[in-house]
Amino acid sequence: QVQLVESGGGSVQSGASLRLSCVASGLTFSTYVMGWFRQAPGKEREFVVSISQSGGFTSYAESVKGRFTISRDNAKNTVYLQMNSLKPEDTAVYYCAAKGPSYQYDYWGQGTQVTVSS
């Protein structure tokens, strides 16, 4: 079955960096758009960034533009999220997700917690 496993979360201070990873299995990774989403306590899940199958096209939420960078390694079935200049408002559970032929995010990871203190 399809599995997406995130890692790399943690607790950091404002201004620090973290890199999240998401390893996929059970699907043809290179044919899926991959995305990162986040959900803060008491808030709805929100889109953060996505990357096309080849990695040539990315789309970022305004709140993270210039600070976060998504990348992927299709040979390793892995998508990354480099997060720089972290702010307290970036505190959330971060989820990776895969979007296939249905044009919906069909598969989701279990999430990894990111906590940024001021």
Image (cartoon, rainbow, N blue to C red):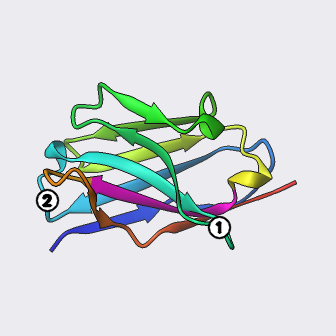
Residue 27's disc is 2
Front-most of 102 and 75? Answer: 102
Give percent across and percent down for residue 34. 32, 47
**Residue flagged by tag 2: what amino acid is it?**
Leu
Front-most of 83 and 75? Answer: 83
Q: Main secondary structure of the magenta part?
A: strand
Q: Quadrant of the C terminus?
A: bottom right
**Magenta residue span:** 91-98
The residue lying at 14 percent from left, 44 percent from top is 31
**Is residue 94 one of those drawn in magenta?**
yes
Q: Secondary structure at mark 1?
A: loop
Residue with the most extreme right position: 118
**Residue flagged by tag 1: what amino acid is it?**
Lys
The residue lying at 14 percent from left, 59 percent from top is 27
The residue lying at 20 percent from left, 47 percent from top is 32
The residue lying at 26 percent from left, 55 percent from top is 104
- In the picture of the structure, the residue carrying the numbered disc 1 is 43
Give percent across and percent down for residue 74. 22, 41
Q: Is residue 9 left or right of residue 106?
A: right
